[in-house]
Amino acid sequence: MKTQLYEGMFIINTGNDDESSRNEVLEEIRTELKRQGGSIESILELGKKFFTYQIKKQKDGYYYLIYMNLNPQTITKLLARLKLNGSILRQLILKIDEIPKPEERKINHRENSYSSKPSEPAVNEEETKKQEETDTPDTPEPAEIAEAEDTPEPAVEQEPVETTEVSVEEIEKKNTPEVSAE
């Protein structure tokens, strides 16, 4: 039986914040993996995080990243069995080629997100300082704003529109279908 390496992200219900209850859920995941012929390579606890929106009436959850070997044909059975567990709020399992090295993983607690690759600064700091020195402010001075408010808008000339007077009777006559008397 050929196995594939997978990365699984699991969000576990905080419940009563008891570590033993979280360990029980992890043990259930471990036993289900063994039942399906898989094995766990490593488990990373990413900690308790608050959700942007509620998931199953919960405001927060414990995140676990689990690297596992599993037969690709049994992945759907595993997902179905884990969905029955009420303590697992969300799960996502992805196929990967290799487990990222610890120095390649970066957990950004400030942004409340996980990234497997280290982030790089978007702009060089020296370039930013040089640009700040040479840039002129885009916002107008208060005097410029006052002058602009005092200046009246130029009038826009409109072409005259041709109008014709029509009586109500003529409109009704046009809209009423003619009935022929035969």
Image (cartoon, helix red, strand yellow):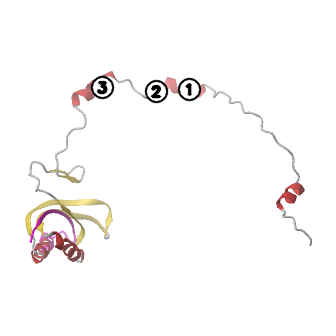
* Position of residue 127 in the picture relative to residue 167 (left or right): left
Q: Secondary structure at mark 1?
A: helix
Return the disc, 2 or 3, that comes first in the chain's sequence.
3
The residue carrying pointer 1 sits among few (fewer than 14), some (14 to 19) or many (20 or more) residues within 10 Å by Cα, namely few
- Among the 4 quarters of the image, the one containing residue 28: bottom left
The amino acid beneath tag 3 is Gln
Residue at the spot 13% in from the left edge and 57% down from the top edge: 97
Q: Which quadrant, please, contains the C terminus?
A: bottom right
The residue carrying pointer 2 sits among few (fewer than 14), some (14 to 19) or many (20 or more) residues within 10 Å by Cα, namely few
Contact flag, marks 2 and 1 (Cβ < 8 Å): yes
Residue 6 colored magenta? yes
Label drawn at residue 148: 1
* Position of residue 77 in the picture relative to residue 148 (left or right): left
Label drawn at residue 131: 3
Label drawn at residue 87: none
Return the disc, 1 or 3, that comes first in the chain's sequence.
3
Q: Secondary structure at mark 2?
A: loop
Does residue 23 sit above or below 164 in this rendering? below
Q: Position of residue 82 (x, y in %)?
A: 21, 74
Residue 128 colored magenta? no
The stretch of residues the image draws in magenta is 1-25
Q: Which residue is labeled 2 in the image?
A: 140
Numbered circles on residues, count: 3
Residue at the spot 22% in from the left edge and 49% down from the top edge: 110
Q: Position of residue 115 (x, y in %)?
A: 19, 51
